Amino acid sequence: MIKYTSMTVTEVLQLVDQLVLKHTGNHLNDIQKNVVQGIWQGQTYAEIANEFGYDSENHIGNVSRELYRILSDQLGEDVNKSNFRWTIERLKDSLNSLNSSKVFCIDIKSSFNLCPLIKNNDIGSNEDDEIDFVNKSYCDLTLAPKITHFYNRTTELQTLSNWLTNQNTRLISVLGLSGIGKTTLVKQFVDLNLQQFDVVIWKSLKLSQSLDRIITEILTTVNTESIETDNKLTQLFNLLRQQKCIIVLDDVQELFTKGQFAGQYQTEYKDYKTFFTMMIEIEHQSNLILISQEQCQEMLCLDEDLYPVKCLELEGIDNIKILTNLGLNDEESWLKLIDLYEGNPIYLKDIASLIRTIFAGKVSEFLREDALLVTEEIKFRFNELFERLSPIEQQIAVEVSKSSQPVSREDLRKSLSLSSMDLINGLQSLSKRYLLKTTEGDKIGFKLSPVFREYIRTLG
């Protein structure tokens, strides 16, 4: 009896992509990736169309049937929606049965014929030998999260895809409040596009902030050459030129100094500033994605039209699907709850737990409280953030929180003993942390994120 191994969506996409590439000469496009993911997760064509923002389930059906036709041709047996998962798992299991010195040729016909790996130094010079090999690559996603649900970020995914695959933007910042979905979005993009990169590296700066250590780890695991201690950056950029790499640095705000305005590097991490600048200025074919709650200074002073740099700022999600599987009732009230908590998935997950426990899962009962409640979990998150603010930002935040209406600069100047420069810099820094929004009317005003404003009020 064959024991089928559990496969991730990433593994499925890689396998199907290789089969499609062999048949058509092209990798999976975005809609094909979404269709494969949806079919693998057991969704109907209508559900796939709805989740990924396509207008017609008929179009999804047509794309699916073309994929089945390609897979059927490559595998030498009929593949359809009902047996897709079983077929792919059986193929994967057959591949896993080979030892580590073997790979399969993507010329699979009848019962998954497999052929042994021919190492690069064993390949003869006969140009008539048409043997395809799985490209040697390195992928380290050990510190990346596993994505179980992904909702309503199709536009953002398409934006990242355009920047990275079409424009080859070398430095991208994905920014927004804690819990808004920055890491989830980037991980979903990486999962869907692994085949486009020779090297994939994911590092969390909450665990290790040393740039030297990160570069050493990359060179040690990817490069076969010995590392030159005094020349690591040069070696790294040689790698970025020679291979298509994507490096993701999560929690970049850990590099910045607490108690100062946003984006100020700690002294021991100023080498990152040099590294980020080099990523922009030196010619290479690779990409760096920064995930952060604060924007670094390099991104602020560069013209996106002139430099290969982009910023993607995330806001909340307004799709009720983010509340599914959280044990809530009264679906007709879900959008109001989402709006109350700014569509922030983490806030909503925390408040859903409270609603299940205290209100028996009834959202309408919770909303009758007519109050924005801040859970202990949300408080804990904001405690960390509040500690990062400079004293000037803290003063401004407390003052703005006293009003539910936008507050003007003139009113703040009267209420606070701050110079005009300190006030303006403080307002800008709070904006760079995505805690403060500017409003336009008779006067330019400023208001806090509603959940953060309620948190400030609890400090009382």
Image: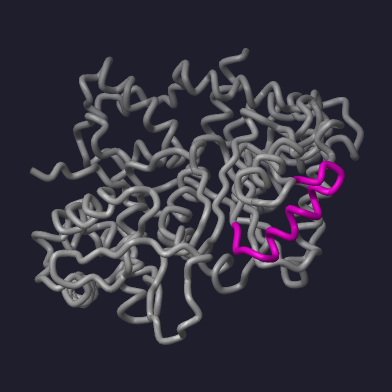
Bounds of the magenta span? 227-245
Q: Main secondary structure of the magenta part?
A: helix
Count of labels in the image? 0
**As drawn, is 194 to the left or to the right of 333?**
right
Asked if residue 366 is among those painted magenta in the image, a careful observer would answer no
Q: Is residue 237 magenta?
A: yes
Q: Residue at x 39, y 81 (%)?
A: 129
Q: Is residue 445 visible?
A: yes
Nearer-the-camera pick, 395 or 90: 90
> Residue at point 75% right, 58% down?
237
- Name the residue located 61 percent from the left edge and 50 percent from the top edge: 222
* Res 265 → quadrant: top right
Q: Position of residue 52 (x, y in %)?
A: 33, 61
Q: Quadrant of the N terminus?
A: top left
x, y percentage for residue 106?
31, 70
Q: Is residue 186 left or right of residue 307?
A: left
